[in-house]
Amino acid sequence: MQINNIIINIINNQNIFKLIPQNIIVDTRKSLSLSREDSLITISKAIDLGRYLKSNYVLYSIISGNQKVKLKYN
């Protein structure tokens, strides 16, 4: 399971925030001419995307590390 899916599942299970569906984010990225290879590496691009979608919050993080490490969550 990818880390993105783990984070999405954790946030969804908390029932505090409502996440924007991935297909809407993909369509919006296309509308803003952000390619799939553009990983929103700058916080300003992430904020622009959030504003365009009229989001109340933007979760922005950079995750790096050893892919051999296994992440467990409950």
Image (cartoon, rainbow, N blue to C red):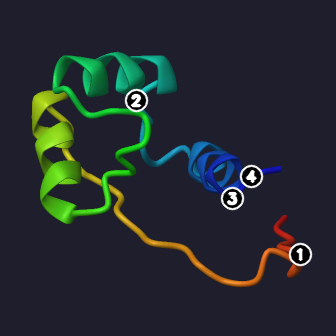
Left or right, 27 with respect to 67, comes to left
Amino acid type of the residue tagged 2 in the rendering = Ile
Amino acid type of the residue tagged 4 in the rendering = Gln
Q: Which mark is residue 2?
A: 4
| Mark 4, secondary structure of its residue | loop
Mark-to-mark CA distance, 1 and 4: 11 Å
Residue tagged by mark 1?
Answer: 70
Q: Which mark is residue 20?
A: 2
Mark-to-mark CA distance, 4 and 3: 4 Å
In x, y percent, where is residue 52? 12, 30
Amino acid type of the residue tagged 1 in the rendering = Lys
In this rendering, the answer to whether 32 lies above or below 72 is above
| Mark 1, secondary structure of its residue | loop
Query: Along the polypeptide, which appears first: circle 2 or circle 1?
Result: 2
Residue tagged by mark 3?
Answer: 3
Amino acid type of the residue tagged 3 in the rendering = Ile
